[in-house]
Image (spheres, rainbow, N blue to C red):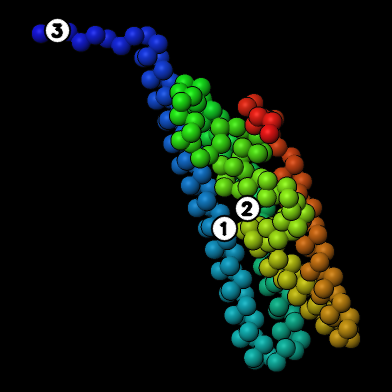
Amino acid sequence: MASEIPPSRPESGAATKLQILATEHWSLLATRSLTYNESLARVNIFLAILSGAVIALALIAQADHFGRTFVAIAIPVLLIVFYAGIATISRLMALNQADYRWVIGMNRLRHAYLELHPELEPHFVASPYDDLHGALQTLGIDIDDVRARRSLGSIFHLPQTLPGMLTVIVAAVAGAIVALGTVALAAPSAVIALTAVTGFVLVLLVAGIRGRRSLTRLSPSLQPRFPSPPG
């Protein structure tokens, strides 16, 4: 019986490379899954704290009829909710940065796949490039559509994200805290409304600036090594 012919060295090396790349790809996929799970868990924890605080304050309001006791209890309770919200938003931003890193890593692995087998390129939907354009393509975001409505699209897109949604809720909590503080000082209704709106808008602006800075501060390891071709 004829003995099997051992594979040639180039073919064996290519198979080993593919196995290593595939293992790393699955590792990044698992890490992305853990990132998503932690994001959802953080949001659920915050919503549970918010719901419990609202229910407790509603019961106190029924007993005290929104009197001084209610205000004295509501302010510290809402401060705790506000802290939990800020901590959750900060963690979500960090998780989004981590998720961007995993996407860039998978794009680089995809680029390595195509270096070994360039004939597979027509079968890939995700991008093999590790710049912003390639990351957005892998995430399913049309970069041409983003460029066409850059400012308007970002304004309406940010509140739909998890950090943006929670920022609106936390800003409303901040407005309620400021309003309760002015109520404790026996301020007029117009002043209460004005301070509540001011607190809401101020938190939105600070969170927006902070979020924008977090997106522009990328690690040197995420600088594009395989940028998208022009055009």
Residues at circles 1 and 2 in contact by the CB criterion of under 8 Å:
yes
| Circle nearer the viewer, 3 or 2 | 3
- Amino acid identity at mark 1: Arg
Residues at circles 3 and 1 in contact by the CB criterion of under 8 Å:
no
Circle 2 residues within 10 Å: few <14, some 14–19, many ≥20: many
Q: Which residue: 46% across, 26% down?
A: 119
The residue identified by callout 2 is: 92
Left or right of 23, for residue 60? right
Q: Please, what secondary structure does the residue beneath circle 3 have? A: loop
Which numbered circle lies on residue 42?
A: 1
Q: Is residue 83 above or below residue 176?
A: above
The residue identified by callout 3 is: 2
Give how far across and how far down residue 154 sits, in percent.
72, 55
* Alpha carbon separation for disc pair 3 and 1: 62 Å
N-terminal label among 3 and 1: 3
Circle 1 residues within 10 Å: few <14, some 14–19, many ≥20: some
Give how far across and how far down residue 27 sits, in percent.
46, 36
N-terminal label among 3 and 2: 3
Give how far across and how far down residue 118 sits, in percent.
49, 24
Q: Which corner quadrant holds the C terminus?
A: top right
Q: In this view, does 10 lie above or below 219?
A: above
Left or right of 203, for residue 84? left
Q: Which residue: 58% across, 74% down?
A: 52
Q: Which of 91 and 128 is in front in this view?
A: 128
Residue 39 falls in which quadrant of the image?
bottom right
Q: Which of 193 and 229 is in front in this view?
A: 229
Q: Please, what secondary structure does the residue beneath circle 2 have? A: helix
N-terminal label among 1 and 2: 1
- Amino acid identity at mark 3: Ala
* Alpha carbon separation for disc pair 1 and 2: 8 Å
Residues at circles 3 and 2 in contact by the CB criterion of under 8 Å:
no
* Alpha carbon separation for disc pair 3 and 2: 61 Å
